[in-house]
Image (cartoon, grey):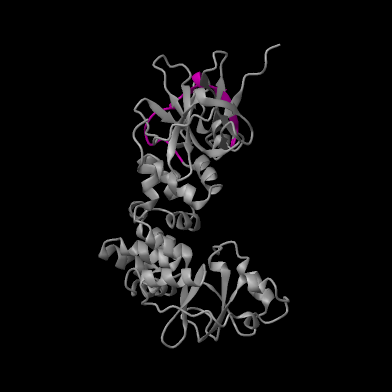
Amino acid sequence: MSSPTPRVYAARLLGLPVFDPQGEQVGKVRDVVVVLRSDGGPPRAVGLVIEVFGRRRVFLPMTRVLAIEADHVATTGLLNVRRFEQRPTEILVIAQMLDSRVTLRHSGVTGTVFDIAVEQSRTRDWFVSRIAVRESSRTFRRRGQTHVVEWGEVEGLGRRDDAQGATRLLTALGEMRPADAARTIHELPPERRRSVVLALTDDRLAVILEEMSEEDQVEVVDLLDSERAADVLEEMSPDDAADLIAELPADTAAQLLALMEPEDAADVRRMMAYAEETAGAMMTPEPVILSPDATVADALAHARNAEITPSLAALVFVCRPPLETPTGKLLGAAHIQRLLREPPSSLAASAIDPSLDPIRPDANIDEVAAHLATYNLVAAPVTDEQGRLLGAVTVDDLLDHLLPEDWRERAAERGERR
């Protein structure tokens, strides 16, 4: 008896790690590349788009795929590291087929594609074999009904037009880290990118925007109406929002600031007041701030907040009221490592590091780097002349300013056409 034909669904491949024969991970699956056939037969799956470390996307031919398992893809280890560039005859399943509107030939039912299966033939070639379609909602009885059909039973799939929504890709983006989601959106065709951006929630779009290049950020803002753009800016960190607004035309920037909530706009304007490449311009104005009577348990509870980056959670700042930047006088900062050794009921102020000096907001980038390196810090307080806490500068804030402006794009831009 012959073994069953291997069949895998594209949406389930997204994000799977790719391993070489030695068991070393070489990247993650980001898409499936298929070629349409002139005779109307099932498209041939010619390879996978793999994101290798450094965020470069490369092409992995299906001939070099040894196995596709539920939790990984195994390869021969022969990986071409040249950047993937899509050819005119190629279609990307995730980016260009999922969420397309199609019609079932025999029934006339319309719906959207939510998954596509590829399977290996006896000749070891891979072809698109099944299309999973969810019906459009015309009657209550048929709402949500799904069909899994052969390639030849659908019309309208594979066209390069705007008949594509974002539902399935949104699900995939929701499972990615923001940096990976930003790269995926960057790689989408313009119309597909627009539909995805408009469908994302404000908070999710905000965290993804923070991971985009300045050029991509401006393009995304241009896709939004002014009210929506202002809402998204409110969800961003004030320092990131200030950097983005600085890249916009002056009249657009003024309009968006006027539409933002006054408190949020004030935080952004305060960040924009600092000169570029200074501690004030690069700091994060929302570190963990505690009152003098806060306990170690209080400090640890704040540091556990999943929305706080590890570097920002490394220090907690004890200040006199008000406890929002600019605060009252900064009494000191305590390292999270020290707090972990203290009784939960003790005061966080008792764990303050007396040797930790603050940074001036006008300190230049070299002074900030020297300060963090000299004292082996991942974060440091920034205070004004009155000793009030203005924010915290972290090592990741520093790296964002030390690296070239196009650092997010450089890895992807290396290499030639495959």
Relative to 231, 245 lies left or right: left
Q: Residue at x 61, y 22 (%)?
A: 6
Question: Magenta span has 328?
Answer: no
Res. 124 image quadrant: top right
Q: Front-most of 324 and 344?
A: 344
Residue 353 sits above or below residue 135 on the image: below
Q: Which residue is drawn at 51% across and 25% down?
A: 64
Relative to 405, 4 lies left or right: right
Relative to 291, 326 lies left or right: left
- Which residues are drawn in magenta? 143-165
Asked whether the viewer can see residue 414, the reply is yes
How far from the left and from the top, in percent, is residue 173?
A: 51, 46
Q: In which quarter of the image is the N terminus?
A: top right
How far from the left and from the top, in percent, is residue 327?
A: 49, 82
How far from the left and from the top, in percent, is residue 243?
A: 36, 64
Q: Which residue is drawn at 47% across and 84% down?
A: 388
Q: Front-most of 259 and 326?
A: 326
Question: Magenta span has 156?
Answer: yes
Residue 49 sits above or below residue 393 on the image: above
Residue 171 sits above or below residue 376 on the image: above
Q: Quadrant of the C terminus?
A: top left
Q: Residue at x 26, y 61 (%)?
A: 249
Farthest-out residue, front: 374
Residue 246 sits above or below residue 353 on the image: above
How far from the left and from the top, in percent, is residue 43?
A: 46, 21
Q: Front-most of 327 and 352?
A: 352
